[in-house]
Image (spheres, grey):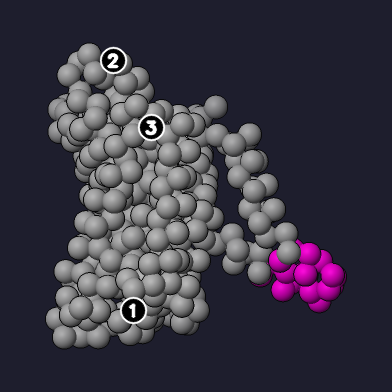
Amino acid sequence: MQGTCGLFHTSYASESQLLPTSFQRWRFGLFFAAYAFCPLFLDAYDLSVLIMIHVAVIGAVALNLLTGCCGQISLGHGAFVGVGAYASAILSGLGLPFLLALPAGGLVAACVGMFFGIPSLRLKGIYLAIATLAAQIIIEYLFLHWDGLTGGSNGMIVASPDLFGLAIDDEPGHFWLSFAVAALVVLAVSNIMRTRPGRAFVAVRDYYLSAEIVGVNLFATKLAAFGVSSFLAGVAGGLWAHYVMYVTPEMFGVGLSISYLAMIIIGGMGSVQGSVFGAIFITLLPEFLTFASGAASDVLPGLSDSLMAMKEGIFGLVLVLFLIFEPEGLSYRWRLFKAYWKLYPFAH
């Protein structure tokens, strides 16, 4: 009996599934089940790195929705993360439960992001990037000088999360919380990209005049992209603030915005999976440099100090190398890897 070879779809609903094959569903299910047990085997420091990866994944997915999918360049993403962090911290300090303070902080960040996204109707490309950089500088200034609300340069103490009377004040609890939120955000954005608004985002990115001709409201679409992206950025900031339990203006500088931009460039613009890859790569890069400098200290003590001093330079060099040799990001390399083994040994 001769059977079919390959993956064949007979309907649009079948083709548009996030996990179209049973192998993919089993693979993801087993991975998530194994990953959820990490707190049983890792120490507190390793879990803290994973928690920061979860926060970075949320922020990178949010920026990729705006920049990679809708084509609206933003250099103020770190400021929107900060708005969510401060708003969530203030609201929880006023007695609002964590489950309400976290999305409320995201809503405040969404309102701020949409306000600074208004110029996107008239500004494009580098001009929009400068406008969002101005937003970054303005919000940073408010963080630093609005002492009565943000605590100024002294920062602000944040309460630990509390879920249904259960205090989350250790690394395993924060790991499971941040992992659950990150998984929900990735799932939500993946589904948004399959909806009509998501296809409108891509249409605006590809060519805004054609999108407008077929009936896409450019202003509403761009503003929605800024709103959703800023909301998710605010959620990332709220998680970060409640984890470290202390926020200062220095945490949300322009360097954070550049780091998020590097994540989506290295991972792959317009790809949710690429955002995850980029967040993991950028978060682990300093850890790798620390490990390399420690390993080199026994052989070449001077090299260890040089590596740590050149951390920012190495970060920039990695970004430039990706732009030159892998402009489509890690997600593209992952697709090539999967295609090769799917056709092996007949792949060329």
Q: Check whether the beta carbons of the residues at disc 1 and disc 2 lie within 8 A of each other.
A: no
Q: Is residue 66 left or right of residue 96?
A: right
Q: Mark 1 — residue?
A: 158
- Crowding at mark 2 (Cα within 10 Å: few <14, some 14-19, many 20+): few
Q: Mark 2 — residue?
A: 210
Between the C-alphas of marks 1 and 2, the distance is: 47 Å
Dot 2 or dot 3: first in sequence order is 3
Between the C-alphas of marks 3 and 1, the distance is: 35 Å
Give the number of the mark in front: 3 or 1.
1
Viewport quadrant of the N terminus: top left
Q: Residue at x 68, y 53 (%)?
A: 314
**Image vertical order of residue 174 relative to residue 24, above or below:** below
Element assignment for label 1: loop
Q: Mark 3 — residue?
A: 71
The percent position of residue 334, horizontal first and vertical second, equals 47, 42
Element assignment for label 3: loop
The percent position of residue 96, horizontal first and vertical second, equals 17, 75
Element assignment for label 2: helix
Between the C-alphas of marks 2 and 3, the distance is: 14 Å
- Crowding at mark 1 (Cα within 10 Å: few <14, some 14-19, many 20+): many
Dot 1 or dot 2: first in sequence order is 1
Q: Residue at x 16, y 86 (%)?
A: 165
Q: Residue at x 20, y 78 (%)?
A: 94
Dot 3 or dot 1: first in sequence order is 3
**Image vertical order of residue 260 relative to residue 148, above or below:** above
Closest to the observer, 341 or 312: 312
Whether residue 161 appears in this view of the structure is yes
